[in-house]
Image: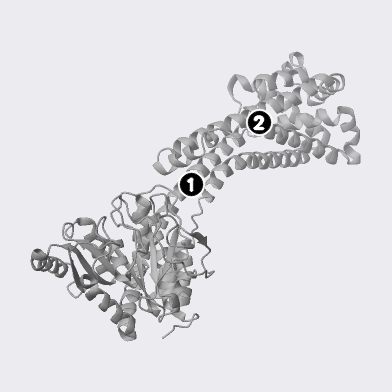
Amino acid sequence: MTAPASSPLLAALDQLRVAVASCAFPLELPAAHQARRTQQSVTDQLSDYILPRLSRLDAPLLVVVGGSTGAGKSTLVNSLVGRRVSQPGVLRPTTRSPVLVLNPEDRAWFASNRVLPGLARTTGTTGTAGTAETPGTPGTAGTPGTPGTAGDGTAGNSLQLATDETVPLGLALLDAPDVDSVVTENREMADQLLAAADLWLFVTSAARYADAVPWGFLRRAVERTVAVALVLDRVAPQAIDEISAHLREMLDEQGLGQAPLFVVPEVPLDDEGLIPLNAVMPLRIWLGNLAADSAARAAVVRQTLEGAIVHLIGSTPSLVSAHVEQLDAIGRLRADADRIYRAAGARVTEGTADGSLLRGEVLARWQEFVGTGELLRSLERRIGWLRDKLSAALRGRPAPENELTEAVETGLEAMLRAAAESAAEQTSAAWRQTPAGTALLEQDGPALEYISPDFRETASRAIRDWQGYVMQLVREEGSDKRSVARVLAYGVNGIGVTLMIVVFASTAGVTGAEFGVAGGTAVVGQKLLEAIFGDQAVRTLAARARKNLDARVEALLGAELLRYLQRLDALGVYPDVPERLAAATDAAAALR
């Protein structure tokens, strides 16, 4: 019976597919490698098998012929069909591109993108690799001929279709690459194809039936309750009973005691390289009967489909925990960067308020600007007299005023650059404490371990903009009729730079012997501004100038921090994924 495409279970599993695909494991954490494999396996299982099969329960049965290297899979498929449709050979690996053999009437189902949508179909004569056919676009059936190969020694990304009327209607045979191939791509392709099968037809030989790799796949079939049949190939006639009995014991121990077992004796191949028909006739009859019995086919589909759904539902909790592990690691890296840059911003804020800038060049230019000597020795005299002296100095010294403005810019830019460089160094060191952080830094080269190349220019521009803002504050405050004459007397630039000096000593951080110089000159500026605007206005002006400066500092360092945060955001590990995946899993489990 065909399941409606809009069935609740189908919709829930499709949502589960979307949720699984949204998981991300970019950081090399303990659970990441296995989580990536699980994610790929679950995604493939849903896209390649569960969703298409659930949408068409009556679609042709897909029998994947798998096994280890040299087991004779291709020869067996060719012999069942009665002609060479898949290329066997003495070179390993032999099956380079998976070959799907089907009845012409079933071609439309397998030529579409409903089954194994990630594999392009190839058409043309079976004697060549054929031409790529976009999944979903049915082509013409290939003309029988000599089988070809993909030509590169790997399974590639294509599926070669071969049609033959001897294949029972409602059943298709897929000759898969070796499960133990020396080529990684072949092994991965074999794993993907077996996961897309309704029935595993597992082929092993008398010489290799006890090998570990094939049994690993068979144990996986038991875990997923996949329908399995086995073929014991190339068995010496005199050893058939003994080896068959031993293999049956092994199957019983692994929970596969009910799996059909077919024995193909070691016999000479005919001129076409095929096993004589009588040697494969029991298997051919069994496959024919299975194809003809709709109830038997439905039982196989139901067993494998239900097992696949149960298995993938059981796989999602590990994806949730692995994704949470990624989120936790990213959270720690983010917290480290945020903490370090916040501390850097706090240091700059403190340094621009405690008098630290009133040293060196800034102090020298300020002293030159206001006139040191007699002025500083007269700090304890009347403020009115001091204001008169300062007024004369301001009116007659335009050049020192400009030099002081430049010194403020240079000193402030140096402080910002030092803070940004220190923050970048500390953040890099913190990230390098973990393998995940180290990998991120090495992926991006040295870029994140240093400040941005244009930081100095950006900082200088921000400081000049702040200085312009301070000047504008003075203009606005000086527009009052009561203070306009005083502002004109002292000059906007002179008053503005004096306000900057007051801002830089707003917490009176300069102590000891320096107070008489740096702190004293700040007091001079404070008293001058109070004489012009009044003490309340000066406090307001200084607060506004300070707030604006702090905002610009925060923006500058925030832009530097943003480089690290954007690097983490670019990983695509989203916090809502675990909840969405858990909800999708619960919904699918409830409808199973």
Say above or below: 470 vs 306. above
* Residue 579 drawn at (x, y percent): 45, 66
- 129 displayed left or right of 522: left
Query: Coloured how?
Result: one colour
The amino acid sitting under disc 1 is: Ala
Find residue 410 and name its label.
none
At a point 73% along the width and 21% down the height, the residue shown is: 366
Say above or below: 555 vs 20. above
Do the residues under discs 2 and 1 have CB atoms within 8 angstroms? no
Closer mark to the observer between disc 2 and disc 1: 2
- 466 displayed left or right of 445: right
Between 263 and 250, the one lying in front of the other is: 263
Say above or below: 11 vs 126. below
Whole-number angstrom distance, CA of label 2 to CA of label 1 = 26 Å
* Residue 437 drawn at (x, y percent): 44, 42
* Residue 397 drawn at (x, y percent): 84, 19
The image quadrant of residue 542 is: top right
Mark 1 Cα shell of 10 Å, populated few (<14), some (14-19), many (≥20): few
The image quadrant of residue 430 is: top left
* Residue 443 drawn at (x, y percent): 48, 40
Find residue 456 and name its label.
2
Q: Mark 2 or mark 1, which has the lower sequence index?
A: 1
The image quadrant of residue 171 is: bottom left
Report which residue position mark 1 lands on. Answer: 335
Q: What element carries label 1?
A: helix
Q: Tell me, yes or no, if residue 580 can be seen here.
A: no
At a point 78% along the width and 34% down the height, the residue shown is: 530
Between 472 and 227, the one lying in front of the other is: 227
